[in-house]
């Protein structure tokens, strides 16, 4: 027990992680200064985000299809070369 008490006394007498950057104190809440938005503006933002999401998904699907077609062509060419 003496060793444990000695080691406990050797620990620094400061708050843990006080000098590190980041969220140390959970009691402090970040305050944001956001502008007020009307429901019309929020609806427009929602529609724009949905449209952007559709375009992004279309691009991902097209890229996946094109990549899979090229891989399929490459595998068929590779099998033809290996068979002959």
Image (cartoon, helix red, strand yellow):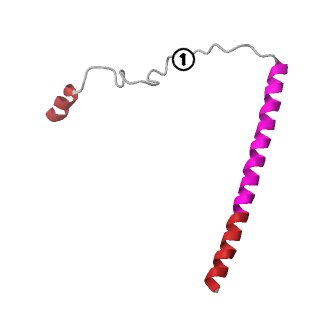
Which residue is at 81% across, 16% downward? Answer: 38
Q: Position of residue 22 (x, y in %)?
A: 45, 25
Q: Position of residue 78 (x, y in %)?
A: 64, 76
Q: Which residue carries the number 1 mark? A: 29
Q: Quadrant of residue 52?
A: top right
Task: Name the side, left or right, on which 63 lies relative to 14.
Answer: right
Q: Is residue 51 above or below residue 30?
A: below
Task: Name the side, left or right, on which 54 lies relative to 7.
Answer: right
Considering the whole magenta stretch, tell me its main secondary structure: helix
Which residue is at 77% across, 16% downward? Answer: 37
Q: Position of residue 13 (x, y in %)?
A: 26, 20
> SS for tag 1?
loop
What residue span does the magenta drawing correspond to?
39-68
The extreme bottom residue here reads 84
Q: Nearer the viewer, residue 53 or 76?
A: 76
Q: Nearer the viewer, residue 6 or 14?
A: 14
Which residue is at 75% across, 59% downward? Answer: 65
Q: Is residue 61 above or below residue 34?
A: below
Quarter the C terminus occupies: bottom right
Q: Is residue 79 above or below residue 32?
A: below
């Amino acid at each position: 027990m003496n060793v444990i008490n000695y080691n406990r006394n050797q620990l620094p007498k400061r708050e843990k992680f006080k000098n590190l950057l980041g969220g140390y104190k959970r009691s402090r809440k970040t305050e944001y200064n956001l502008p007020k938005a009307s429901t019309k503006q929020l609806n427009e933002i929602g529609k724009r985000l949905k449209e952007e999401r559709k375009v992004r998904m279309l691009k991902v699907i097209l890229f996946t299809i094109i990549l899979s077609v090229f891989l399929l062509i490459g595998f068929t060419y590779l099998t033809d070369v290996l068979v002959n």
